[in-house]
Image (tube, rainbow, N blue to C red):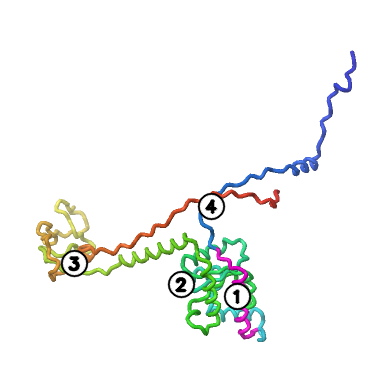
Amino acid sequence: MAAPSATNLPQPVPIVSDKKRKKALKNIKKKKVDRNILTKPDDDYWPVINEEENARLHEAFQRLLDNEQNLDNMKLVQKELMILKRKKWLEYLVFGINDVPRSVIKGSVAAVLIADDITPRHLVQHVATLCGTAAVPILIVSSFRQYTKQLLGFSSIAVGIRKHVGESEDNKFYEILKLVKEISENYKPPSSITQFRKAALQKRKEIKNTVSPEKTVAVKKSTPSTDLYLYRTSHASRVFVPESQKVESSSPKIVQKPKMEDFMSLGDIDWDMDLETDTPLQGISYTMVNPKKKPKLEPITPSYQPLKYVKVKPNPNKKSH
C-alpha cells in the first residue's frame, strides 16, 4: 500500500489570536447612512446680533460700568459683596432662565438679553420664542457672561430689563434699554410666531365682548306665577312631587303635598308679552330673553405648514465604541 503524499495531507487550520481578530474587525469601515428626519417648517427664532451691534452694546455696558461706584474698595468678603450687588440690581433687572420667562409672561420686563454660548441651546430656546410671542425685544449677545461678571459681580446667561427703566431717562439702564429696542428692530420674529400672537389677541377680544352684565327685563305679568323656579323650604322635603308618586307610610321622610298654586301653567302664559312693561321677570338673564348680537371679528386662521424633510449626515468625528 502506497504511503499518502504530502499534498494529500490535511492542512492545519491557522489560529488567529484575539488581538489580531479585534484589530482586523476594527479596520473594517462601516458604511455611514444618511438619516432622514422630519422637523418643524420654520427655523428657530434666535436673533444673534452682528459684531458691530455687539460692539455698541459693549460700549454701553462699559460706560455704565465706569459710572458705577466701585464697591470693591469696601472691606467686605467676596460673598457678601456679591449679595450686596445682586440686591442692588434686582430693582432694575431680572436674572436667570427661570425668572426671566415668568417676568415675560407677567409683562413686567421691557427687553431680554441672552448669552450666545449656551450649550445645549434648547435650554433657553423657549425664552426667545416666548419673547417673540409677547412682542418683547430680545437679543443674543456674545461675551454676555463677561459683561455681567464685570458689571454685576457675577455671571448670568439671561437678564431681563424691567419696564419701569424706560419711564425715566435718568435711569442707569435707560441707554441700554433704548439701544436694545433699536437693534431688535432688525430681528423680527417669524410669521408663525406673529400669527400666534394675533390669534391670541383676537381670542382675548372675543372673550371680552361676550362677557356682559346680566340685566332684568321688564315683561308683562303672567299668571299664576312670575317665578320660573320652585324653592325648597326644608332639606327633608322635595319641591316637585308628581301626583302619581306614592309615599310609603314607613318612609321616615316627610313629603309635603304639592299645591296647585306652586306650579306654573304653560297654557296661561301670554307668549306675546310686552317687553316694555315694568314687571321684572325673575330668574332669567338679559341674554336669555333678548340675546344681543355681538360684533363679529374677522377670523384669523393660522396657516398650517407641512413638516420639513431633512437629510442629516452622521458626524464623521464620532468615535464608535
Query: 135 above or below 263?
Result: below
Q: Secondary structure at mark 3?
A: loop
Q: Residue 263: give x, y in percent of width and height.
A: 14, 60
- Residue drawn at x 55%, y 82% as measured from the top left: 172
Q: Amino acid at mark 3?
A: Gln
Quadrant including the N terminus: top right
In-front residue for pair 200/25:
200
Image quadrant where residue 51 sits = bottom right
Q: Earlier in the sequence, mark 4 or mark 2?
A: 4
Give the residue number, with chain letter if any, for mark 2.
Answer: 107
Identify residue for label 4.
39
Residue holding disc 3: 282
Q: Disc 3 vs disc 1: which is toward the camera?
A: 1
Q: Residue 76: where, in percent of width, then height?
A: 66, 84
The earlier-in-sequence mark between 3 and 1 is: 1
Type of amino acid at the residue the image marks with label 2: Gly
Disc 1 residue type? Arg
What segment is highlighted magenta in the picture?
Answer: 46-71
Q: Give me the C-alpha separation between circle 2 and circle 3.
A: 42 Å
Mark 3 and mark 4: Cα distance apart in space = 58 Å
The tag on residue 56 is 1
Q: Percent position (x, y) of residue 159?
A: 56, 72
For the residues carrying marks 3 and 4, which lies nearer the camera in this image? Answer: 4
Alpha carbon distance from label 4 to label 2: 31 Å
In the displayed structure image, the side of residue 28 where residue 38 appears, left or right: left
In the image, 241: left or right of 76?
left
